[in-house]
């Protein structure tokens, strides 16, 4: 996992208000939900969008990733906290690169397996392996609790996210990933999975601890 705080301008007030309406009326985010916002519409009303992308691109170059960001898919996301989860079942071939756009709302991005806890504020940038359990939790909390995100409380975070190809040698090197490949097992699977101790694994949404998949 790699992180930094980048100097990016605040999104326009009208755009933030547009996001808040979408989150409230269209997405109806509940505690722990993560959903997509319309990026194309946002870009049309976001003069500094290119500046944000350039800041992330410049940062990733300092990590040795060269031009990998320019060829990757990007999405605009919103979350109202996030339960502990991993994304390896759907994005096992990727690492995520996230740029958080909201102001500091006393929330942290927590990786329980490594102990990393990153305060989320405007400009927070993070690259991480999608198979790594993570959550967005209240800063003074030791885990995810839905009660920390009550209705009417301003606790949403908006962020840009890129999917970086995990097979790119520069991405693997930047994240210090050592691949442990089991070809005989992989040939028997029809979808991406995360295994632990020889069996499919899932993550406890409250604590982030690994457990045997149901």
Image (cartoon, helix red, strand yellow):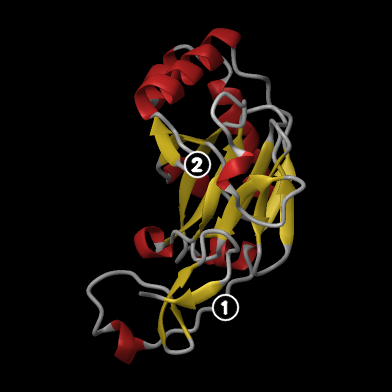
> Residue at horizontal 45%, vertical 25%?
23
Which quadrant of the figure contains the N terminus?
A: bottom right
> Residue at horizontal 73%, vertical 54%?
117
User: What crowding class fits label 2: few (fewer than 14 Cα within 10 Å), some (14-19), or many (20 or more)?
Assistant: many
Q: Is residue 164 left or right of residue 90?
A: right
> Residue at horizontal 60%, vertical 10%?
13
Is residue 166 or residue 204 the one in the foreground? 204
Where is 112 relative to 135, above or below?
below
User: In this figure, which residue is indicated by the disc labeled 1?
Assistant: 178
Give the label on residue 152, or none.
Answer: none
Question: How many labels, in total?
Answer: 2
Is residue 172 or residue 23 the one in the foreground? 23
Q: Is residue 144 left or right of residue 92?
A: right
Which x, y percent locates residue 214?
35, 74
Where is 85 relative to 163, above or below?
below
Mark closer to the chain start, 2 or 1: 2
Q: Are marks 2 and 1 in contact (CB under 8 Å)?
A: no
Which x, y percent locates residue 140?
77, 47
Label 1 sits on a secondary structure element that is loop
Residue 22 visible in the snapshot: yes
Where on the picture, by quarter, is residue 5?
top right
Of circles 2 and 1, the one toward us is 2
Which x, y percent locates residue 123?
69, 33
User: What crowding class fits label 1: few (fewer than 14 Cα within 10 Å), some (14-19), or many (20 or more)?
Assistant: few
> Residue at horizontal 46%, vertical 37%?
30
Label 2 sits on a secondary structure element that is strand
User: In this figure, which residue is indicated by the disc labeled 2?
Assistant: 161
């Amino acid at each position: 996992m790699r992180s930094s705080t980048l100097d990016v301008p605040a999104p326009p007030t009208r755009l933030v208000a547009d996001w808040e309406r979408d989150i409230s009326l269209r997405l109806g985010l509940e505690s722990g939900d993560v959903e997509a916002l319309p990026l194309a519409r946002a870009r049309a009303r976001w003069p500094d969008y290119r500046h944000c992308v350039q800041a992330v691109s410049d940062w990733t170059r300092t990590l040795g990733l060269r031009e990998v960001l320019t060829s990757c898919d990007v999405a605009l996301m919103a979350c109202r906290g996030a339960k502990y989860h991993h994304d390896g079942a759907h994005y096992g071939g990727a690492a995520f690169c996230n740029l958080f756009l909201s102001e500091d709302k006393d929330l942290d991005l927590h990786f329980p397996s490594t102990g990393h806890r990153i305060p989320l504020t405007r400009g927070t940038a993070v690259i991480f392996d999608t198979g790594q359990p993570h959550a967005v939790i209240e800063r003074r909390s030791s885990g995810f609790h839905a009660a920390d995100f009550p209705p009417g409380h301003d606790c949403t975070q908006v962020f840009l996210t890129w999917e970086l190809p995990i097979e790119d040698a520069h991405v693997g090197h930047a994240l210090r990933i050592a691949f442990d490949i089991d070809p005989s097992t992989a040939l028997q699977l029809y979808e991406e999975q995360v295994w632990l101790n020889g069996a499919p694994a899932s993550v406890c949404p409250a604590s982030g601890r690994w457990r045997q998949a149901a």
